[in-house]
Image: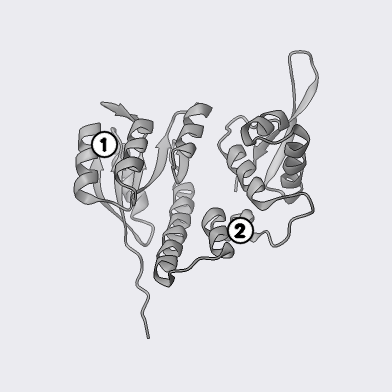
Amino acid sequence: MIEHQQPNIEVLIIEDDVKIAEINRRFIEKVDGFHVVGIATDDVQAKEQLDILRPNLVLLDIYIPGSNGLELLSYIRQHFRDTDVIMITAAKEVEAIREAVRSGAFDYIMKPLVFNRLQETLLRYLDFHSELNRLHHTGSINQSDVDRLILGTSKKDSRAEIAYLPKGIDKLTLVKIVQAISTAADGMTADQIAKEIGVSRSTGRRYLEHLVSSGEVFADLTYGVVGRPERVYRKREA
């Protein structure tokens, strides 16, 4: 009988504030299966420890002396393909969030760091890591495997619980829209979603209203410069 060992995810924290780095370390090590192997406070330390430690996961602040988090994220994706990154920052610029997502960040968490939010991401990463290992050992993959990797396996993630979608709602397009909404701190309109995803406004509106009906997104009205009300969609917090 094969015994399944608890995964040991090695984490490197890249954070210039030593006190915050220590808080993050304590948070991480409260979650079973994670162990902090190093803390780097600048660009030089970060690159040295990446090369020596080869961690599974990096918690990366966007503001790093001698560099910035987005440049370092790109460096990690280029030189350490087996290392994943979670961005943690106080920056609220939408473009920075989009760039982090486009560059392959696993998640993007805003400061001040809340333990429950970090724990949720770490547990989702643990599922992701375990699923990749399982697929590596089986040597085969099917559509349901791909869906689990893309959508996640957390029971709290309603995207993973969709067994049936109404006519005209495609799963992958829906995931893209959810991801776009999740990274928009001020919400998005149907026009903005359409431009971001590359669909028509009516299609974007249809998907957004589906998400509203499922409870994953909520909408409220905002008034533009001419006073015309427009629906703005925001991700509902868990």
Q: Residues within 10 Å of mark 2 (few under 14, many from 20)?
A: some
Q: Residue at x 64, y 32 (%)?
A: 187
Specify whether 73 is left or right of 231. left
Q: CA distance from mark 2 to mark 1?
A: 37 Å
Q: Residue furthest front?
A: 140
Q: Reply above or below: 48 against 133.
A: above
The reply to whether discs 2 and 1 touch (Cβ–Cβ < 8 Å) is no
Name which quarter of the figure residue 17 lies in.
top left
Q: Residue at x 26, y 26 (%)?
A: 66
| Picture coordinates of residue 58, whole percent (x, y) | 34, 46
Q: Amino acid at mark 2?
A: Ala
SS for dot 1: helix
Residue placed most toward the observer, 43 or 171: 171
Point out which mark residue 18 bears.
1
Specify whether 92 is left or right of 10. right
Residue placed most toward the observer, 175 or 24: 175
Name which quarter of the figure residue 39 lies in.
top left
Q: Amino acid at mark 1?
A: Val
The residue under label 2 is 160
Point out which mark residue 74 bears.
none
Q: Residue at x 72, y 32 (%)?
A: 190
Specify whether 94 is left or right of 29. right
| Picture coordinates of residue 237, whole percent (x, y) | 60, 44
SS for dot 2: helix
Looking at the picture, the colour scheme in use is: one colour
| Picture coordinates of residue 69, whole percent (x, y) | 36, 32
Residue placed most toward the observer, 5 or 143: 143
Q: Is residue 62 visible?
A: no
